[in-house]
Image: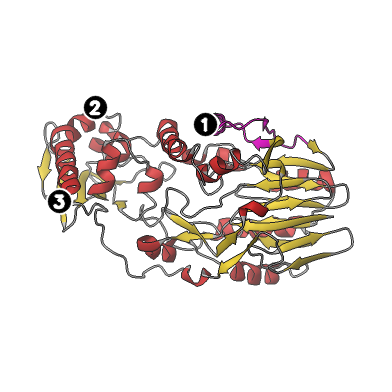
């Protein structure tokens, strides 16, 4: 028999007769650059969490790879013992951070390569994300757990197709308990002026995976957080479905598959003869408050204006001086050196940068269609087909190298849009559909979202939390 306990979001405690496994631990609010909180909120008695044989990390998104929780665990020698095995993807950045935190016994997993630990076989399952968009090119895996009698699969965030499903079925014939993806997150779509609707094709893949697997029981998994405090308006724009809606749709789509809600503190008992879920039966975690009503998909709900997060007058004065100096003395030179300059000129881009302070905003513009070298104009010049609006606090942090686009594009204080086309004599040209970032935003070009930005982001958290008394 296998038991699984949901701690929160994607963090599962999986227990066989002899083996304790923990996946993707995120135990503290706030998470992901302090943008999100767990939802529903939980009470977690960390001193009651049993010692672990295996700690599994599926990938390096910060709602799965939480430095604060990892820093807590690595110095807790009751939970992480000298024999604990840490399973991790072949991701050089993730592995270097684990090394910096001083984790031992780290094992890099390979797709469908079984790992025997006591009485269970753990089999990492691949994700197709590495052949999709550039920003998602990092290794991640789901996890099959088999104790010789029953099999569960935690899909986590992995993207799977028929080939992966067939391989899973070939291994075990069927899945007894399935933690399924259920919500296509729209995080960032608001900031990028992208569609704010349920992406039906992606959503249908989740339903089709359940139908193809036909497990004995399925529960929604891996999407139990929300935006916090002043960012809560983004809850109306980021989560286009709910557990309840997914289960209703699933019941209509494949009524033969039993399904259930699954919340922190719920314990699933999976045996050869029976599967049942005990509500709030965990010894160490329970729901504190079911605040999931705060997540309500409602595009068109009121949106606050962008405003700097800096309230101290002295800091704000320094911030505005730094921002204005960068824009008026450095921005144009950096734009002129960009590899994208030819594209901006070809598409005759009229670019506007709007910076929001404590009261109102300031605007600068560049018209790449002007004769001669581009010039920086103070103010609006009457047309925009590439726009970036950003708070002075976030732009100043980018200038100083103290933030990442992970935070800036998800916090609600950066917004962009484009209307890119080119008129020729008797003709009308649009950018190729398969090159949506053909005319990349200048700030994102000047401060590139690359592996080094991610490394700096994680290292800031390592310096903040490593060795701290919790």
State left or right for residue 149 relative to residue 260: right
Nearer to us: label 3 or label 1: 1
Separation (CA) of disc 2 from disc 1: 29 Å
| Secondary structure under the numbered disc 2 in the rendered image | loop
Q: Which of marks 3 and 1 is nearer the N terminus?
A: 1
Q: Which of marks 2 and 1 is nearer the N terminus?
A: 1
Q: Residue 42 carries which label?
A: none
- The part of the chain drawn in magenta is 86-114
Q: Is residue 111 magenta?
A: yes
User: Which residue lies most toward the top here?
Assistant: 337
Q: Which residue is drawn at 61% across and 71% down?
A: 244
Nearer to us: label 2 or label 3: 3
- Position of residue 420 relative to residue 457, above or below, is below
| Secondary structure under the numbered disc 3 in the rendered image | strand
Q: Earlier in the sequence, mark 2 or mark 3?
A: 2
Q: Residue at x 79, y 61 (%)?
A: 269
In the rendered image, is residue 258 in sight? no
Q: Toward which corner of the image does residue 118 lie, by quadrant?
A: top right
Q: Does the magenta stretch include residue 469?
A: no
In the rendered image, is residue 431 in sight? yes
Residue 139 point in image, percent of width and height: 59, 37
Residue 347 point in image, percent of width and height: 26, 41
Q: Mark 2, residues whose alpha carbon is within 10 Å: few (<14), some, or many (≥20)?
A: few
Residue 32 point in image, percent of width and height: 46, 49
According to the picture, the residue beneath numbered tag 1 turns out to be 93
According to the picture, the residue beneath numbered tag 3 turns out to be 362
State left or right for residue 354 relative to residue 29: left
Q: Are marks 3 and 1 in contact (CB under 8 Å)?
A: no
What color scheme is it? secondary structure
According to the picture, the residue beneath numbered tag 2 turns out to be 337
Separation (CA) of disc 3 from disc 1: 38 Å
């Amino acid at each position: 028999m296998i038991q699984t306990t949901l701690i929160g979001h994607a963090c599962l405690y999986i227990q066989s007769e002899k083996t304790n496994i923990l996946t993707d631990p995120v135990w503290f609010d706030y998470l992901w650059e302090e943008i999100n909180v767990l939802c529903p909120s939980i009470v977690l008695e960390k001193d009651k969490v049993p010692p672990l044989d295996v700690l599994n990390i599926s990938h390096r998104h910060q709602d799965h790879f939480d430095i604060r929780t990892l820093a807590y665990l690595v110095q807790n020698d009751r939970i992480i013992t000298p024999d604990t095995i840490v399973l991790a993807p072949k991701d050089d950045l993730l592995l270097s951070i684990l090394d910096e935190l001083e984790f031992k016994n780290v094992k890099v997993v390979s797709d469908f390569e079984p790992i025997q630990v006591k009485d269970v076989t753990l089999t990492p399952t691949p994700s197709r994300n590495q052949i999709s968009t550039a920003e998602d090119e990092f290794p991640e895996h789901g996890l099959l757990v088999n104790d010789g009698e029953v099999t569960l699969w935690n899909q986590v965030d992995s993207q799977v197709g028929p080939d992966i499903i067939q391989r899973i079925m070939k291994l075990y014939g069927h899945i007894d308990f399935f933690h399924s993806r259920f919500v296509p997150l729209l995080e960032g779509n608001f900031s990028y002026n992208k569609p704010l609707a349920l992406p039906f094709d992606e959503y249908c893949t989740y339903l089709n995976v359940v139908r193809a697997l036909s497990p004995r029981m399925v529960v929604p998994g891996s999407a139990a957080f929300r935006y916090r405090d002043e960012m809560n308006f983004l809850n109306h724009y980021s989560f286009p479905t709910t557990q309840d809606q997914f289960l209703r749709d699933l019941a209509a789509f494949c009524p033969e598959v039993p399904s259930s809600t699954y919340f922190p503190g719920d314990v699933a008992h999976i045996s050869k003869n029976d599967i049942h879920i005990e509500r709030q039966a965990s010894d160490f975690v329970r729901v504190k408050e079911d605040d999931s009503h705060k997540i309500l998909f409602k595009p068109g709900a009121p949106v606050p204006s962008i405003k700097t997060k800096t309230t101290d007058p002295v800091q704000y004065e320094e911030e505005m001086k730094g921002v204005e100096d960068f824009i008026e003395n450095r921005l144009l030179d950096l734009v002129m050196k960009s590899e994208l300059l030819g594209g901006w000129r070809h598409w005759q881009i009229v670019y506007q940068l709007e910076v929001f302070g404590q009261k109102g905003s300031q605007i600068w513009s560049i018209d790449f269609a002007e004769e001669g070298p581009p010039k920086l104009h103070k103010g609006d010049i009457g047309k925009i087909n590439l726009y970036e609006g950003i708070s002075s606090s976030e732009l100043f942090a980018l200038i100083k190298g103290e933030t990442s686009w992970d935070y800036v594009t998800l916090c609600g204080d950066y917004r962009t849009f484009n209307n890119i086309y080119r008129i020729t004599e008797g003709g009308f040209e649009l950018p190729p559909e398969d090159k949506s970032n053909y005319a990349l935003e200048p700030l994102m070009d000047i401060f590139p979202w690359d592996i080094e930005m991610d490394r700096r982001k994680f290292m800031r958290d390592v310096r903040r939390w490593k060795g701290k008394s919790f």
